[in-house]
Image (cartoon, grey):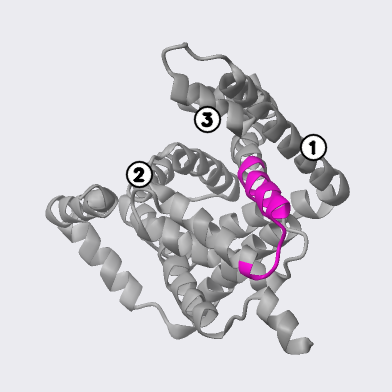
Amino acid sequence: MRKAIGSLFILAIVISLAVMQRSVLLDIWQRLIDLSLVSLFPLALAALLMIVARGAFLAACSPGINLRQAISADQTALAAGYGIALGGGLVGTGTRIHMFTRWGIPHSTIATSIVATAVVPAFSTWSLPVAVLVVPVVLGTATSTEVLVVIAGALVVSLLGRFASWSRLLLARKVSSRFTRTQGIIERFQPTAFFQEMRTDLIELLRRRWAPIFAASLGTLVAGFCCMWTASVVFDVSGLTFSEAVVAFSLVRVVIALSPIPGGAGIAELGLIALLEQAGVSVIDATGTTLLYRFLTWFLPMIVGSLLWWQYSRTDVPADSREHLHV
């Protein structure tokens, strides 16, 4: 039942909109079915750009993985993460570990890749609104919400580098003598040595590949914005400037990051609609743009990832089996 909470939440939102905003949904549906086939090409191109950009970022963080493998692993993990409401992120990570292991990637490289693909996007998610809104905040033209996001973003970015140290100290700190089993687990786990090794590996990865990693991370931001901007253009939205779209995109990424549901399903849609309406877009244009954008970035990865997982499970051969075949 708990795994269905996210899906039930989305269903509740859809039903609420269908009851309370029926005319709006009917207008949106009519405009969507009136779209020409030619107008679908930019959407497909934006979706492809997003898939390749995410794959390039994973490949940059994972030495030994080519772009094709990275795309397969990333989209498969997204399909698991978005398709399973609670615990989907762990399932997606486990799927990626399974695929990397089967391709013969060392466990240390896998662990470093997982940490890098978590830390770098978190840094970009919170630094983007800071970079976009710092001037309005300084000039005093930003809203209270935007000021709060900038302050929170600056704090998160400054604290990200200390997270590993805090986690190491938290695990290494002696617990009460009553919890003897917990003490034994911590002693066997050796958290200080583990976090030190992870920190060293991550620093070495960033030292050797910092340029492609941060370039690919920036590429995912650009690709995500292209998906939203393309959705607004295809839906023929009026009243939305480029700068307003950048602000809305940067803020909705924060909403997704704060959501307990993988991909921010439900919450991200409501947040983006509200942000676009705040920018002066009509409710129909805001809702239509949001539906197209989330189709490209949330629903489509579940389809692509499922197909890639099916192809992988049917055709891929473990690394050790390939070695025996070549002997």
Write the residue at 42% across / 41% down.
275
Q: Which residues are magenta?
A: 102-119
Q: Earlier in the sequence, mark 1 or mark 2?
A: 1
Q: Quadrant of the C terminus?
A: bottom right
Q: Secondary structure at mark 3?
A: helix
Q: Main secondary structure of the magenta part?
A: helix
Residue 114: % across, % down: 63, 49
The amino acid marked with disc number 1 is Thr
Write the residue at 56% across / 14% down.
174
Q: Is residue 109 magenta?
A: yes
Write the residue at 24% across / 47% down.
2
Residue 81: % across, % down: 43, 56
In terms of image quadrants, where is residue 193?
Answer: top right
Which residue lies under the disc numbered 2?
A: 267
Residue 62: % across, % down: 72, 58
Q: Nearer the viewer, mark 1 or mark 3?
A: 3
Q: Nearer the viewer, mark 1 or mark 2?
A: 1
| Residue 232 visible somewhere in the drawing | no
Q: Secondary structure at mark 2?
A: helix
The amino acid marked with disc number 3 is Ile
The amino acid marked with disc number 2 is Ile
Q: How far apart, in angstroms, are the residues tagged by discs 1 and 3?
A: 23 Å
Which residue lies under the disc numbered 3?
A: 185
| Residue closer to the observer: 37 or 308 | 308
Vertical comparison of 3 with 188: above or below = below
| Residue 84 visible somewhere in the drawing | yes
Which residue lies under the disc numbered 1?
A: 200
| Residue closer to the observer: 16 or 100 | 100
Query: Badge 3 local density, few (<14 within 10 Å), some, or many (20+)?
Result: few
Q: Secondary structure at mark 1?
A: helix
Q: Is residue 303 magenta?
A: no
